[in-house]
Amino acid sequence: MDRFGELAIDVRSLLESAVKVYSISEEELFFKWEAWCFKMGTNPELNLDNATLFKQDIQHQLENSNQTRLKASVAATPASNKKASLAGYEDFLGGDVTPQSKRVKRESFKRASLTTPARPTGSALASSPLAANQTPHQLGTPVAFRDREDAGVIITSLNPTNMDAPLPSTSTPSLTANFDPRKYSFRPMYQKLSEVSEILDDQIDSFAELVLEKLGLDDEHLGDPAQQKQTDVLVVGRIVCDALNGGRLNAASVMLETSRRLGIGSRTKLDLSAVESYALFPGQLVACRGINGTGTFKVSEWVTPVALPPAASAPSEFRKETMSIVIACGPYTTQANLEFEALHALREVIMADKPDQVILLGPFIDRQHPLISSGDFDCPGGSLDGLFKDLIAPVIQDFPGLLVVPHIADINSRHPVFPQEALQRSMTGLPKGTKLLPNPALFSLDEVSFGIASPDIIKHMTTSEVVKNPAERNGITRQAAHIIQQRRFYPLFPPQISLDAGFLGLAEFGNRVPDVLILPSELSSFAKVVENVMVINPGTLSRRAGPGSFARLSIQPKQVKSTQETDLYSDAMKPEPLDDLVQHELWARSRVDIIKI
């Protein structure tokens, strides 16, 4: 139950009983919980009541699955007419399987909002004792956006005692781009395998240099894991799965892939039985010690590289006033319509609070939206660009200090791969004051450095990781730590998104770790301090059938002194002297609120 984090005794007992009763693994149970939370759309807390409802929902799914298989077996019997041959699929076809003789005219994309669906008769949720004295919304049932409750309520806070509310500032934060936008204007998916292999090799070789730097060794001390020896050796490589078709990683399928310089690109099976703890995922760069005496490399110890130095600036570069930033991530409308009610609600918040900066991440118009994918919408101006100009630009064009980061699912993006160039200004219709950033983006607002990437890397790594007694028990914190330690926004490989491996260098952190990492995810929204970095998942502003959340970051000015008051590092991890630079220590003077829209 490590993936669930800390649990009450009664909740843990209930979940353990579900594993035994339904014959599923703890990992599968966690995935079912995340899917249930996303389906409910209200970030339900894992308490005894919700755990009971969750267990009943699993039971209901199993019953439906058994009934569907039974109906399918009956349907396999030769039928006397076409309608009978569709027996068992009424649940998917709405009960009426007779084809319409005339096509019904589609409505405009401005449809009525969703109403709360009635529970099916015999539903396990409907039979719950809580159903009689709780409203559907309290049980996590999706509700229409306009009927949402608790708008503006703070879901969770990081450092709530740091400050009540930022004071109005009189100066606009200075934006500094820490990237070259011209490098993102490449032809997507136009790459050579030889170039990709060289880039993947360079990642391993660069990681090896960091390991040797920490240990004070040279290349002669690195070994080849494929060579059988009876002595302990230090090896560096990339974690891969032994299945050529991209199977799921597990303890028995972990292999280490070397670069051509360190081991002629060989893959060697790893024996993890001698290590007490590990947390591995495909694409992870690792260093370890061990012995290969039988053709399998038996790992005895993990070796970590030198850490990236923290963000630091000269005393004169620090902002003298408070700074307030609103962060939101798409989708910005429910799947029932294209009215963008959540975006309009966010506008009301921004016009009332007047933050110094607004950061919006895509997808703005998701190509996977049911109305978009089916073509069931009106197209203003005769092009898809008209959708953004008519539905989104008028709402956000006067947001203060607006920064826009795309998503590979944006239908208006000409660059649907990661790394991704910025949206075209001519397509968006946004004024020149709006800054259009690439994906990922590294930039600074005054002294505060930000790193943003819109792919759901937290979710992708959660579903790909294999763990044993991890030092960090919280799964989300562990994934964020992986990203910081790997120094890349998307370290998972093979990827679960459209990724141009030839330009992975654009997804690296650079020479310093950012103060703030914004990593949007469909999983529960959060704000955490991980290895002295503030990691924020604002959640999606709109869920499939209801409201989502956004984040508000409030930053106090730092009282700059000539020397650092605190020493955050042990002697082994202490970075080089910063030559009159002062560490930002943003986590100690900031507050993050995750707020329901």
Image (cartoon, rainbow, N blue to C red):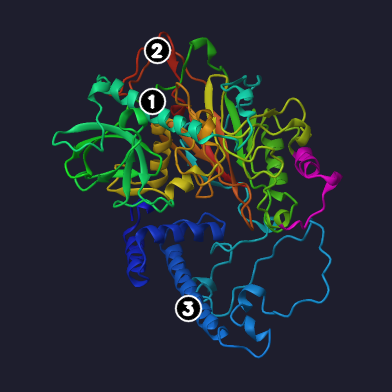
Observer-nearest residue: 458 or 562?
458
Residue at image point 50% right, 36% down: 193
Q: Identify which residue is drawn at 38% across, 15% down.
A: 564
Name the element at disc 2.
Answer: loop
Q: Give the CA distance from mark 2 to mark 1.
A: 23 Å
Decide: marks 2, 1 in contact (CB < 8 A)?
no
Quarter residue 414 falls in:
top right
Mark 3–mark 2 distance (CA, rounded to whole Å): 65 Å
**Residue at position x 24%, y 46% from top?**
272
Mark 2, residue position:
578
Residue, far right: 381
Residue that label 3 marks? 66
Q: Residue at 55% x, 31% y: name it.
A: 554
On the rendered structure, is 62 left or right of 546?
left
| Residue denoted by label 1 | 206
Q: Which residues make up the magenta segment?
A: 374-395
- Out of 67 and 192, give the one closest to the viewer: 192
Distance Cα–Cα, label 1 vs label 3: 52 Å
Residue 498 drawn at (x, y percent): 56, 43
